[in-house]
Amino acid sequence: MRFSALRSTGVVGLAAAGLFAAAVPAQAAQAAGSGSAYGASITATVGPVSVTTGQLAPTNTSNPGNASTGLVNVPTDLLTVGAITSISEIDTSNNVTEIGTVFRADSQLLRLHADLLRARCNAYAADVTATNPGGLTGLSEITNLTIGSTTITPTGDVSQTQTIDGVGTIILNEQTTNSDGSLTVNALHIKIDPNIDPTGSASGDIILGSATCGTYLAPAATPTPTPTTTPPTTPPGGDSGTSGSGSGTGSVVPEGAPETGDGSEAAVTAL
């Protein structure tokens, strides 16, 4: 695998106004042998405070490697994260691996806790000369997720969805096939319930752990062979050296010998 040096932005603190400096967004995966990942993204409005983080700790296959962000505190008690990392890998065969991870996520406002939220996708390049068709796979790893007094157990299903009063709609292992054929996996996507704000005007999305893999190289089409016609080895009518029917056997009549009506030789009387 090809890697760049580890990039770390250290500890991130948020101003009271609640606005993150947006991280450089990861490049969207569009072509075969490309991908991107990030640890977290928040776009939310709660009361008078709006939060826009951009994509935190982004990586992509244009500059493959690792990215990490230390402690993150979002205002309004919306989210505290212990650490965020992402990994982008591509090998010489254009096989791509993208991973976005959040460690120790807590939200007092949403009454949420999780030890680990990780999204992963792989794009396997096809072998155009053999039987490997290539393909896209995605999965999520979620450990100790609780909201309020409820423990949320991942089923392993794609886009496992649950609505929780006072929190919103949560989607585990969210997987989306994009218009360009790429696959995006989000470990946890929270669509905020407007009623978490007393005015009923809260809105926004929180994504924790995200990875996107571009389309894979499809195998070359195998040409259909043109059928050929093999001429018969036996001339029409059977073997030219035999007579009769059915079994293909018969008696040979000497040249000039008279025959009876049934094909047998006639008696010859000497003069």
Image: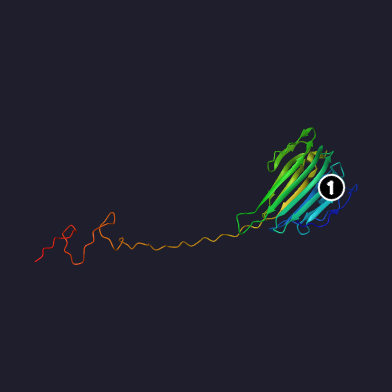
Residue 97 visible here: yes
On-image quarter of the C terminus: bottom left
Q: Nearer the viewer, residue 3 or 103?
A: 3
Coloring scheme used? rainbow
Disc 1 residue crowd, few under 14, some 14–19, many 20+, Cα 10 Å: some
- Secondary-structure class at tag 1: strand
Picture quarter containing residue 133? bottom right
Q: Position of residue 35 (x, y in %)?
A: 73, 55
Q: Residue furthest front?
A: 270
- Three-letter amino acid code of the residue under disc 1: Ser
Up the image or down, 150 lies above or below 186; here it is above
Query: Picture coordinates of residue 79 (x, y %)?
Result: 84, 43
Residue nearest the observer in this picture, 266 or 219 = 266
What residue is pinned by disc 1?
Answer: 50
Residue 23 coordinates in the image, percent (x, y):
83, 54
Query: Toward which corner of the image does residue 104 lie, by quadrant?
Result: top right
Residue at 84%, 48% in the rendered image: 51
Question: Would you say residue 200 is visible in this rendering?
Answer: no
